[in-house]
Image: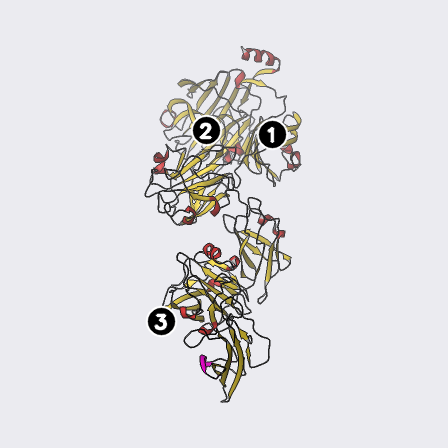
Amino acid sequence: MKKAILLALLMPYMAFGQIIENFESGTTGTWVQYPEGHWNADNTASLSGNYSLHHTFDNPDAGTSRIGLYVPDLKPSLGSTRWSFKIRHGYDPSSSNNWSVLLMSDSDPASLADGGNCNGFVIGVNQTGYDDTLRLWKVTHGTFAVVINSGINWQTDIGITDHVKISIDRSAEGEWNLSVYDINDEIIGNKSNTASELFNQEWFVVSYKYSSTRDRLLWIDDVSIDGIFLEDEEAPEVTGCEVIDSHTLRIVFSEEPDENLMIPPNFRLTSSAIHPAEIVRENYISYRILFNDIFINKELNELIISVLCDKSGNCEENISVEFTPVWAEKGDVIVSEIMADPVPSVSLPEKEYLELFNRTGFPFDLAGWNLTSANQVYPFPESTIEPFEYLIICKENDTALFKDHGKTTGLRTFPSLTDGGKAVFLCDANANVLHGVEYSSDWYGDELKDDGGWSLEMIDTGFPFYEEGNWSASKSRKGGTPGMQNSVARNNPDMDFYGIQNVFPEDSLLVKIQFSEPICKLPDNIGDIIIGGKSVAAVYPVDPLLREFDIIPAEELKRGEIYRLYVSEDIRDMAGNGMQIDTIDFGIPESPEACDIVFNELMFNPFPGDPDYIEFFNCSENVIDASRLVVVSVKGAAGDTSSAIRLSEEKRCILPGTYYAITTDKGMVISRYCSADPDAIFETGALPSMSDDEGHLVLFNRELDNIDEVLYDEEMHHPLLSGYEGISLEKVRPGSVSIEKSNWHSASEASGWGTPGTVNSVFTEQPVTTGKVTLSSTRITPDNDGYEDILVIDFNFEGTGNIVTVTVFDETGTYVNRLAENVLAGYQASMAWDGTADDRKPVSSGIYIILVSVFDDIGKSYQWKKVCTVIRK
């Protein structure tokens, strides 16, 4: 009934017409070829009359030639339609030699040649399969579906000598009939079927595929199209709008638009009044609109087309196209649970898994997404994660084990989740990292759960880039919560951002910077980074988690200079926190020589459960790379050494006059020693073995040159101490000889018994004097309170071959202690006395004589007597 009413309304504008093309004009007329020049109307073996359409191009290569007729006004939905034509193929059909005729196509010949996925109906041979049977197909986005199988084998039933006439009828309701007539117009086949769907039907196209020696063997003639034709008096409409990516749209029109209007100035986004950068024709009704700027994600956007006309001159102005682009941004979908060590199981499957969580109100197609770990890519299958949904990710073979726990997607290959820790990244189809975790077994925080069977769960999914402080061992009695809210879920906001962790110049033109947390927008804000008072030239991310970047300085760095790098307060972490450390000094490192960097503090007998630590001091005027230094312990008279321990696994600057302490547990050292400087303490995977009573440590560079060494034992501690656990040995002065035991002293009680990363509690300033022998003070109060506990004797001689002996006497001239005997001191040296006698017992209060005897390198001897008062409180 509705169709009858529509036909009645359209009747005045309809025409029952026929298009006939017999090529008797000797030309191809309005037919469109692609490629050009492959077809002609000629009289070579014509099928009917004097001329037929003939493929005439002698192609040296295999190819496909197409020719089409534009039929915009045909309306098969309004009445019966008939297509008929005569055809001869002068070679037996095969997969590489065949023909087809697109009765109705929404793509022109050029679009078909460019691989366009057309829609329409096609008759031909071997478009699918290779059985040489004549078929009618429906084609949807390039995919063929058989409508009618004629049962006629082209090779055996038709042959290459004679032509046939093919007639195809379609009713308005979608009933199809295929008839085939031989050269004498006698019917040789007739089949019917129903396919009601219709597409934009604007082209009749002949397609001819041939091998290099089988071109020029297809003829077409007496093409006829009968049906209802309705003259187009309406402007084109936008029938489709697809968001391809964050700055590209695909627009589909109801009919072919005027190409002269498919230009950037005719299109604009209302949000920014920005015109496209480029418009690319995909086929005659489909165009890609490319912008330089990205759309507003997850919000309604509007595209305005100023003028839209068809080829008949029908126009419309100010067409509005609304669309809502949705793509996953950083942190939209996150890794929220990790089962890296499932054995022995609590009650979950003994298989590794990850859990993803969609934090947004939008679904995301996971096609093209992947997990990345250790430079390996693990692609997702076709899958979708719905709004606020949890998704279990595991090996494809393990999916059945997890299906009862929640929605599960199996990957054909799955990253091996090592027990100790690993970096895992979630990437979208454009290789953008959406989220990543570099997890560690230390995150469990529970020794009962870090040996297997328990997952790591994110505490607060509102802060997915807050790593170590936002993960914990599962509290679930099952050992984990795959596919559901985490058992440890609670408010746990990220309130801090440490900031810059390391800056190191790879060379004079490249500086590497490392942050404690991801920084998303740093490459787009290079003006926020200053080196030596000048903006930098460029910034490039090198870490998928956006914590490490390469910086190109504006000017070449110079050796011997210390540079200050500053990052603006505008640069913040993903939670919006400003940096605590936004400034750091660095310089191009030099290779260290002997005594450039020295031992300065030793913790070899810590409290039970506490770690050892070793502190170094850079005495030189050069920057030194910590990764180029190793420390070993020496055992026994044979000199056997432990494994070499690098001071840093990554390149790191030790600036002149600065301290550098290493330990296996930075947090514990900081909490134990109140005087510690956290910024000068660094974790290593191990330390050389350090006995609680005595030991021997050596510092080497990478070339294994001896840089410094120290012999320590517990008797070097202050004799008044009742015990030595948790008390470090400190150097009186960093520049004094490390191997000389008298230069070491117990850390003071006032300092907390240790000063890792900062100035020693027993440090004594070098006096400013021109004397050859000077004392740091005229009195000492050796009670280990950190004040005047040690007397330092400084030597300032001429020449380098001075042999020194230092002896202590009391005021009666009685021998007390010999601090040094025939020691080669060079031209400068220091020695210390802690107020003890030869037997390490404290001396009584009183006046003491320091006798210094020197034998120089030209044979002369000298003596100095100095006086110091010992006061016992």
In-image side of 453 versus 69 (left or right):
left
Residue 701: % across, % down: 45, 68
Q: Which residue is mark 2?
A: 100
Q: Which quadrant of the view contains residue 8?
A: top right
Q: Sequence-wise, which precedes: disc 1 or disc 2? A: 2
Q: How dense is the environment of label 2, judged by Cα within 10 Å: few (below 14), some, or many (20 and up)?
A: many
The numbered dot on residue 639 is 3
CA gap between label 3 and label 1 equals 79 Å
Q: Amino acid at mark 3?
A: Gly
Picture residue at 44% right of the left edge, 37% below the top: 486
Q: Is residue 740 above or below residue 387?
A: below
Q: Residue furthest bottom?
A: 859
Q: How dense is the environment of label 3, judged by Cα within 10 Å: few (below 14), some, or many (20 and up)?
A: few
In-image side of 358 versus 405 (left or right):
right
- Does the CB distance between marks 3 and 1 fall below 8 Å? no
Q: Which quadrant of the view contains residue 70?
A: top right
Q: Amino acid at mark 1?
A: Glu
Residue 263 visible in this rendered orientation of the protein: yes
Mark 2: which secondary structure? strand
Picture residue at 48% right of the left edge, 30% below the top: 141
**Residue 95 part of the magenta segment:** no
In the rendered structure, which segment of residues is drawn in magenta?
Answer: 812-826
Q: Which residue is mark 1?
A: 322
Q: Sequence-wise, which precedes: disc 3 or disc 1? A: 1
Residue 830: % across, % down: 51, 76
